[in-house]
Image: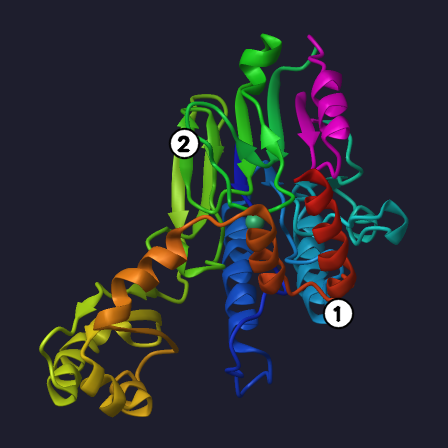
Amino acid sequence: MKLLHFSDTHLGFSEYTKIDPASGLNQREKDFYDAWDQVIESILQIRPDVVVHAGDLFHTPRPSNRAIRVALESIKKISDAGIPFVIISGNHETPRIRATGSIFESIALFKNVYAAYSGKYERFRIMDIDFHCIPHCSLTEELEEALHSVEIDPSAEKNVFITHGAWSGKTFYGMGEFNEQRLPDIEGMFGVNFDYIALGHYHRRVDIKDHVCYSGSTERTSLNEHNSQCGFLTIDLQNMQKQYHEINTRPMVKLPPLDCKNLTAVQIYDKLNQLADAKTANAIVQLILTGIEEHTFIKLDSRAVDEIFANTFHLEKQFYRAAQSADATLKSSRIESLPVEFERYMATVTDRELDQERLAKLGMVYLSQFE
Ligand SMILES: [Mn+2]
């Protein structure tokens, strides 16, 4: 019995302004489709007995027509190949209001597809194996109820558990997202054992135990993930042999911060020229310059730096003046009061479904009442 486990494909994610000339698509959006396509091709080649997707198929609850087409086209291929496909919804694609309906209703129409997306526990039996699914639940009470509904049927030959959220044992595997679901140690909590627990949400590939695994994402949604691999897992449930399959994705590089103390602009350019190499080609690159002298700061030409790194896909620059460095670094790492943190968070939210201004105001009202 061979399982293929992947998750966090975030179809529809887009960033920066570069366009792929051939398709006219945002290049980062296309990167995510390319990563997805690699996994789908592997599925059709490997032909596992069951495919498991542990949530965040889409980046938003209302994916674009393009993202929907990419997903449905591939899921149809898996369905046509007769490979059962078990999928749950994650926090990114679960609508906040149930009445909105879910794109997963359409996905569930395919033959051989088993979709859990209604904020409750669901169990599917495929080839004598029970798949216990808990999708993202919008309310803590829903998650509680779902966890307490888990039931082992003794007639099942094996039991696989699939869920999406931040495993909260000795280590907390969170993404720092507002609506992320905290998962307890499910086996410890209920005294049950599963043959395999397929997790989604945390974008790094991690084994919490030998049989409790995050497959990780198939592309990187942030520079924080610069050193994480992207790919999928295959698991043989008979002998518990696991294999991680890495896929090709756009590189992300965090260059070590360059201390510019006592350096002239020309000397800084020289050092940067040594940093721009094969490693930064076509990559998303973070460049931090610290300790820049006041008189150099004025002369430093941002466009000249861009030209040095012309081979990159995207250059994220942070320049700090000598006097400012310590303070600036301190500022960005300090946790402010709740309203300030909330405002900061709201500034990063780019969900078109939200009335951002209204939500921000409402949040402030609640926070002030709380404080
Ligand atoms: Mn995710």
Disc count in the image? 2
Specify the amino acid type for callout 2.
Answer: Asp
Q: Which residues are magenta?
A: 125-154
Who is closer to the viewer here, 94 or 49? 94
Dot 1 alpha-carbon crowd within 10 angstroms: few under 14, some 14 to 19, many 20 or more:
few
Dot 2 alpha-carbon crowd within 10 angstroms: few under 14, some 14 to 19, many 20 or more:
few
Image height check: is 262 above or below 240?
A: below
Let me know if residue 39 is in the magenta part.
Answer: no
Q: Which residue position is annotated with label 1?
A: 65
**Quadrant of res 148:** top right
Specify the amino acid type for callout 1.
Answer: Asn
Give the x, y percent position of residue 195. 53, 19
Q: Which residue position is annotated with label 2?
A: 207
Instruction: Describe the element under mark 1 as helix, strand or loop.
Output: helix
Image height check: is 6 above or below 237?
A: below
Give the x, y percent position of residue 238. 48, 21
From the viewer's perspective, is 363 left or right of 10? right
Image height check: is 138 above or below 279?
A: above
**Quadrant of res 255:** bottom left
Q: Residue at x 39, y 78 (%)?
A: 313
